[in-house]
Image (cartoon, coloured by chain):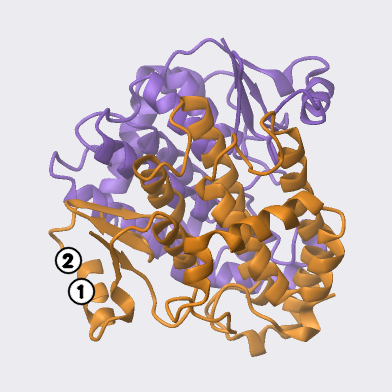
Chain colours: A purple, B orange
Amino acid sequence: MYELYYWPGIQGRGEFVRLALEEAAADYMDVGREPDGMAVMISLMEEASIKTPSFAPPFLKHGDLVIGQVSAILLHLGARHALAPVDEAGKLWVHQIQLTIADLVSEAHDTHHPLGMGQYYEDQKPEAKKRSKEFCEERIPKFLGWFETILTRNPEGSDHLVGNGLTYADLSLFQVVEGLRYAFPNATERALGGTPSVVALHDMVADRPRIAAYLDSDRRLPFSEEGIFRHYAELDA
Amino acid sequence: MYELYYWPGIQGRGEFVRLALEEAAADYMDVGREPDGMAVMISLMEEASIKTPSFAPPFLKHGDLVIGQVSAILLHLGARHALAPVDEAGKLWVHQIQLTIADLVSEAHDTHHPLGMGQYYEDQKPEAKKRSKEFCEERIPKFLGWFETILTRNPEGSDHLVGNGLTYADLSLFQVVEGLRYAFPNATERALGGTPSVVALHDMVADRPRIAAYLDSDRRLPFSEEGIFRHYAELDA
């Protein structure tokens, strides 16, 4: 039994963990969404007996382990639920892709908060517009182009990012495409026009029975302007 | 024999890898700093036969492996050179700390480039000032405070971040303190006043024979306003 701790009401960074847990059909509780879940999470964050406290949610409790940072959580889940290769080289490659996805996610966040989290989006709109212009014109095509390149270079075929089976990197790339399409529909469709393997991978993941059931359930929260991928039409250059 | 590929002339993200290689007394070549090293690096980045190309430098070549992303490189080096615990929980915890350091490094970068890398610092100074204010007042104390907390909670004592031996996370925290002190001397000293264990860890790492020899050599590049940690007096709130 896993306990996932994350802010309720948003997909956010927690969603990368949820997708892995759902695909694995793992027994888990999304604690932040339970009654009093937030209070439990906050108290756990301040609990001195936890020797491995996380800097920020999400974190995953699994027996005695308390693991923070999405990429570290996925490293753990990937090994336990066959969502990563068993060989060292494959394991590192999946992880490297995940870390690059994490960088993309941070940049997507910064588009609406270039001056930091201390101010509302409404108070940094001109700066957000400048940052988003570069993100839409340079960064989205560069990241999606890199995913396309590694898919086409996969010696085992372009159906998966690594090897010939599903990994947590595939699940995360699905989520990135979902998020970018929500936040920056124009810029994203433009870029995806040149990355057919990325689109195919997204569709393959969406069709996996457990993922499809999850997306159709109320466990899947909607995107919103409280999360990381936010749609502000004025930023979609 | 390792080959490190990174931009010449700056410490940057490559420095976290260099510190681990130096502490391990590993045989490595800093390819970007060799004659024609940049040409070799660029051609390798575009070489279609590389099945695991990195999104950006640094990357490490080790036999058939080509590993990108600092945290993935350190995961590999940590296991090979006893710079991480061998048990799964310890390995994950060191990695989680490294990932949090990577987040801090990205935020430190964004202080001088809040609108993105497409414009010079000189063209985004007002925005850099706003972002740096929050970084100095909120983020530096929060990150350093978290390191202090985990040091004091370490069941094996506060000499190391994890367990009772040196890990790559210790080396990286040393580098973060060095970088913050260079870039934001006022804000950093203020915060370090409340984090004596972090200061002690920094000093312990600096005194390790191999690290001390490295810092004293011309292999250690100076900080500069081309790197990630840049000193602009006007940003040091």
Q: Is residue A164 above or below residue B134?
A: above
- Along the horizontal axis of the image, is B126 left or right of A88? right
Q: Quadrant of the N terminus of chain B?
A: bottom left
In percent of width and height, residue B150 lies at: 72, 39
Q: Nearer the viewer, residue B40 or B182?
A: B182
Q: On the image, numbered disc 2 is attached to which residue?
A: B47
Tell me the tag on residue B43: 1
Residue at 34% across, 61% down: B59
Q: Is residue B203 visible?
A: yes
- Along the horizontal axis of the image, is B168 left or right of A191? right
User: In the structure shown, which secondary structural element does the residue marked by tag 2 occupy?
Assistant: loop
In percent of width and height, residue A9 lies at: 72, 31
Figure quadrant of residue A49: top right
Query: Contact (CB < 8 A) between labels 2 and 1?
Result: yes
| Chain letter belonging to callout 1 | B
Q: Residues within 10 Å of mark 2 (few under 14, many from 20)?
A: few
Residue furthest to the front in view is B209
Figure quadrant of residue A110: bottom right
Figure quadrant of residue B68: bottom left
